[in-house]
Image (cartoon, grey):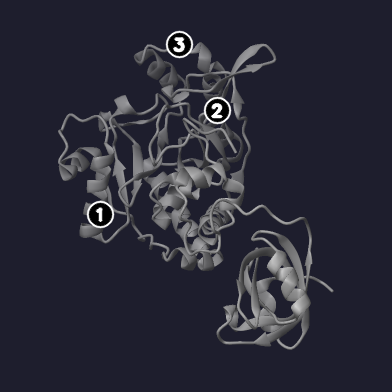
Amino acid sequence: MQRILSSQLPTHVGTTVRLAGWVHRRRLLKSVAFLILRDAAGLAQVVVAAPAVRAQVEALTEETVVEVVGTVVANPTAPAGVEVVDPTVRPLGPPAVPPPFDLYRPALTASLPTQLDHAPTALRHPRRSAALRISAAAVSGFRATLDARRFVEVHTPKVVASSTESGANVFALDWFGRPAYLAQSPQFYKQLMVGVFERVYEVGPVFRAEPHDTVRHLAQYTSLDVELGFVADHRDVMAVLRDTLAGMVAAVADRAAAALDTLGVTAPPVPDEIPAVHFTDALKIAGAPTDEPDLAPAHERALGEWARAEHGSDFLFVTGYPMAKRPFYTHPDPARPAYSNGFDLLFRGMELVTGGQRLHRHADYLAALAARGEAVEPYAGYVDAFRHGMPPHGGFAIGLERFVARLTGAANVREVTAFPRDLHRLTP
């Protein structure tokens, strides 16, 4: 008999079926016992009346893997309006050691560190796994949106020879006796691939050895990177980002509707045109000093509140960041060279995306590096490609875990990350 999932039970009323999954919970009443079985699709209620089978169920522990064969009957009070009766129950492994928290409760009561220490079992909780389903749906929407717009998915090295890209701290390692580093981003490679395919994207891990210990930072996270050629300026990039976000949100609403329901959240609307303010105006709105070179988290929160109040939008573009705070490959604003053709996208008052137009002329790269007092040699393989003809281009990068955390209202990005890596955590 072929196994079915719990979600398929309503279409099998009156028939005998085979289920398999984990013992989610047992309710042992005087005259009857209930075995709640959990599988990848949800929960199934199994009614146990036969004394021999009840004895088996009483001996089971939560999280033991079992097979159940029984008859499906309608019951409006059961999950999905059906339950399984007259079952046989067969363990598919030894009795499980129960985890240090109850997975059958509506919410995990254990502290987040305890959940992360026991992540392989904590992630089985419907609220934890729901966030990962939303993450998967978001990536699916990201890919589908860009595939429909003639982008090509690429895969770039995660071990690199240079430690100087964008000035961030890096993780050093030994590469057959030579120094190497974990890649901070695919920035250089995705730009170079614009010279091949014109439009590219990548989904992959990036590594930042920055000693942040906050609710919004990870040392390893998943970056959704995009780069496109033949742009007029950064506004073309912002338009692609807007459509990409809309595609991600639509995919979440479609493919992860049950997960959204589990968490009690709704997918936010993405405006047809996301409001945008220049960095200098953003400082005024946030009440920040006019000489601030960047936005602090408090400024971002203030801007998020302003965007919601003034535009009814959870999203806000901040454009024209000072060149002093942008990487050397950023294209300056021709009208105001001290400011960039770059942007951040804030989502509910937190930076979600950084992007902009890049330099595309070889001479401009040499000048930009010289102006910052940096040698060309560490970037030689990258900069040299611009001698051979590159179109005006730009791109952006979305932090997947931060996107899911903001969408679900998670207080800590680690709540939506399967196995987070940060300043203190390398296991499990």
For the point 64% across and 83% down, the residue is: 31
Residue type beneath disc 1: Ala
Residue count near mark 2 (Cα–Cα under 10 Å), binned few <14, some 14–19, many ≥20:
many
Question: Foreground: 333 or 377?
Answer: 377
Residue type beneath disc 2: Ala
> Does label 3 or label 1 sit earlier along the sequence?
1
Instruction: Say whether marks 2 and 3 touch (CB < 8 Å).
Output: no
Residue with the mark numbered 1 = 307
Residue with the mark numbered 3 = 375
How far apart, in angstroms, are the residues tagged by discs 2 and 3? 20 Å
> Does label 1 or label 2 sit earlier along the sequence?
2
Residue 35, picture quadrant: bottom right
Residue 280, picture quadrant: top left
The local secondary structure at tag 1 comes to helix
Tell me residue 218's x, y (percent): 46, 36
Q: Is residue 200 visible?
A: no
Tell me residue 44's x, y (percent): 64, 74
Question: Foreground: 247 or 73?
Answer: 73
Q: Is residue 397 visible?
A: yes
Question: Foreground: 216 or 58?
Answer: 58
Q: Which mark is residue 183?
A: 2
From the viewer's perspective, is the residue at label 3 or at label 1 nearer?
Answer: 1
From the viewer's perspective, is the residue at label 2 or at label 3 nearer?
Answer: 2
Residue count near mark 3 (Cα–Cα under 10 Å), binned few <14, some 14–19, many ≥20:
few
Describe residue 401's horizontal placement relative to residue 69 as left or right.
left
Q: Which mark is residue 88?
A: none
How far apart, in angstroms, are the residues tagged by discs 1 and 2? 34 Å
Quadrant that contains the C terminus: top right
